[in-house]
Amino acid sequence: AEYGRRVLLVDFDPQGALSVGLGKGDPRQLDMTIHNLLLESDTDWEDVVIDTGVDGMDLLPSNIDLSGAEVQLVHEVGREYILAQTLKSAVPHYDYILIDCQPSLGLLTINALAASAGVLIPLECEYFAMRGVALLMETIDKVQNRINPSLVIDGVLGTMYDSRTLHTREVLGRIVEAFGDQVFHTVINRTVRFPDATVAGEPITYFDPNSMGANAYRGLAREVLVRWNELESARAGNG
């Protein structure tokens, strides 16, 4: 958004962390969320979208109600594509739509992967996170083969990095070994400014715009935009 793109954020996690982190208070108090959009045919994305206070960036919020959607969607025809259908009319209004998923690999995450052109994988520089990403890669592979053949991995982002510890340095090295050029050059270091920004309900680029964390995410944004532009050019050439 800082670089002039129109962005829609989709909070697709029942915990509503993205909504809370953008200063929306207790997400349980929201009248309309992505849950309504998924399950009510008379609800449009414009009924749910809210302003984030950041120029050029809007939000489709979430709360714990979304956890029940997984059970309700099981009996729907074309259940893997429901999110894609609900977002279709929003696509012309934005340059990019970013979907924030929960850590589990259930039907909600499958919906997000089915609706997406690419996947950004934030990977904490910890051993157990490395184990979890193997399951994610299996899920992405199945979605590519069965549901969304055009889905690509846009990149892998090392997060919660602490150069002072041997463990995180080793894990980052393994990430690079495993994913090669798919790993972003930007690495997000562990810092207290991120939880402070969350408590304040502001993006780090607003809360502490000159901090190391804010500049790291700006660097990531530049990398992402370059990769997306290259992909769009390649798709246009193939088309």
Image (spheres, rainbow, N blue to C red):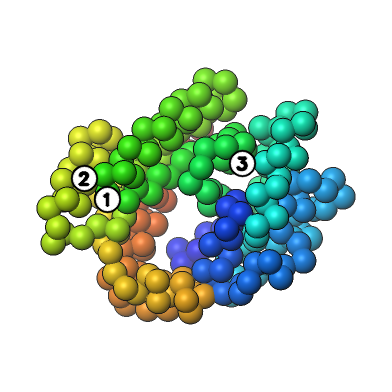
**Residue under the point 52% across and 20% down:** 145
Q: Nearer the viewer, residue 233 or 6?
A: 6
**Residue under the point 36% across and 32% down:** 134
**Residue under the point 71% across and 70% down:** 29
Three-letter residue code for mark 3: Leu
Q: Earlier in the sequence, mark 3 or mark 1?
A: 3
Q: Secondary structure at mark 2?
A: helix
Left/right of residue 129 with respect to residue 185 in the rendered view:
right
Q: Callout 2: few (<14), some (14-19), or many (20+) C-alpha neighbours within 10 Å? A: many
- Disc 2 to disc 3, C-alpha distance: 29 Å
- Disc 2 to disc 1, C-alpha distance: 6 Å
Left/right of residue 110 with respect to residue 221 in the rendered view:
right
Left/right of residue 208 with respect to residue 90 in the rendered view:
left
Label 2, on which residue? 171
- Where residue 88 appears, as percent x and y from the top left, is 70, 43
Left/right of residue 115 with respect to residue 206 in the rendered view:
right
- Disc 3 to disc 1, C-alpha distance: 25 Å
Label 1, on which residue? 125
Three-letter residue code for mark 1: Cys
Q: Callout 3: few (<14), some (14-19), or many (20+) C-alpha neighbours within 10 Å? A: many
Q: Secondary structure at mark 3?
A: helix
Q: Which mark is residue 108?
A: 3
Q: Earlier in the sequence, mark 2 or mark 3?
A: 3
Three-letter residue code for mark 2: Val
Residue 68 shows up from this direction: yes
